[in-house]
């Protein structure tokens, strides 16, 4: 079952910057996040996990070109995208990331019941 905060966050999806469409699903007890990031290289992408939230950032700055160009319109000089997903109690040390054909695929295990610390009441 997905955390209720994820359902709340989806209410605001229309206000987010488009360009990083994503699918988040559960399969075999693990979360899977597929994020489309076309036009970026693997080196342009940074992924962070903190307190149950996965943040994906993609930043691309065009290299200086030795050719003299007279741009009519130049929109691709600097591009930055960011998207966060709250998944709850996850195993942040064992996240697997793969980037292929413009799609980032994350496999994120949830914490097992054994990994949770039990507190004894005195």
Image (cartoon, helix red, strand yellow):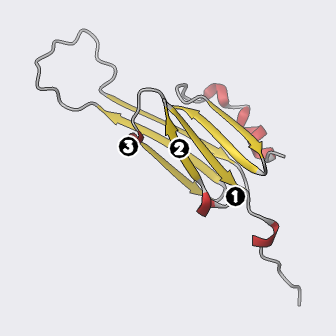
* Residue matched to label 3: 43
Determine the image quadrant of residue 16. top right
In this view, 41 is above or below 47: above
Between marks 1 and 2 in the image, the one whose residue lies nearer the viewer? 2
Q: Position of residue 79 (x, y in %)?
A: 38, 30
At x 84%, y 46%, the residue is 1
Q: Earlier in the sequence, mark 2 or mark 3?
A: 3
At x 73%, y 57%, the residue is 110
Local SS, label 3: helix
| Gap in angstroms between the C-alphas marked 1 and 3 | 25 Å
Q: Position of residue 93 (x, y in %)?
A: 59, 63
Determine the image quadrant of residue 80. top left
Local SS, label 2: strand
For the residue pair 6 and 26, the one nearer the viewer reads as 26
In this view, 1 is above or below 102: below
Toward the right, the furthest residue is: 122
Q: Position of residue 122 (x, y in %)?
A: 89, 91
Q: In the shown orientation, is residue 84 left or right of residue 28?
A: left
| Gap in angstroms between the C-alphas marked 2 and 3 | 12 Å
Determine which of the numbered discs, if any, sits on residue 90 in the image: 1
* Residue matched to label 2: 98
For the residue pair 114 and 13, the one nearer the viewer reads as 114
Q: Position of residue 3 (x, y in %)?
A: 79, 48
At x 41%, y 27%, the residue is 39
For the residue pair 15 and 26, the one nearer the viewer reads as 26
């Amino acid at each position: 079952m997905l955390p209720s905060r994820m359902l709340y966050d989806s209410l605001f999806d229309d206000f987010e910057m488009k360009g990083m469409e994503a699918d988040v699903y559960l399969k075999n007890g693990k979360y899977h996040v597929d994020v489309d990031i076309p036009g970026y290289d693997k080196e342009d992408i940074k992924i962070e996990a903190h307190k149950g939230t996965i943040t994906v950032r993609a930043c691309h700055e065009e290299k200086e070109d030795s050719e003299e160009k007279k741009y009519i319109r130049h929109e691709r000089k600097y591009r930055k995208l960011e998207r966060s997903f709250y998944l709850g109690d996850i195993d942040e040390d064992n996240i697997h990331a793969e980037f292929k054909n413009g799609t980032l695929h994350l496999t994120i295990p949830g914490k097992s019941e054994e990994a949770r610390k039990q507190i004894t009441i005195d």
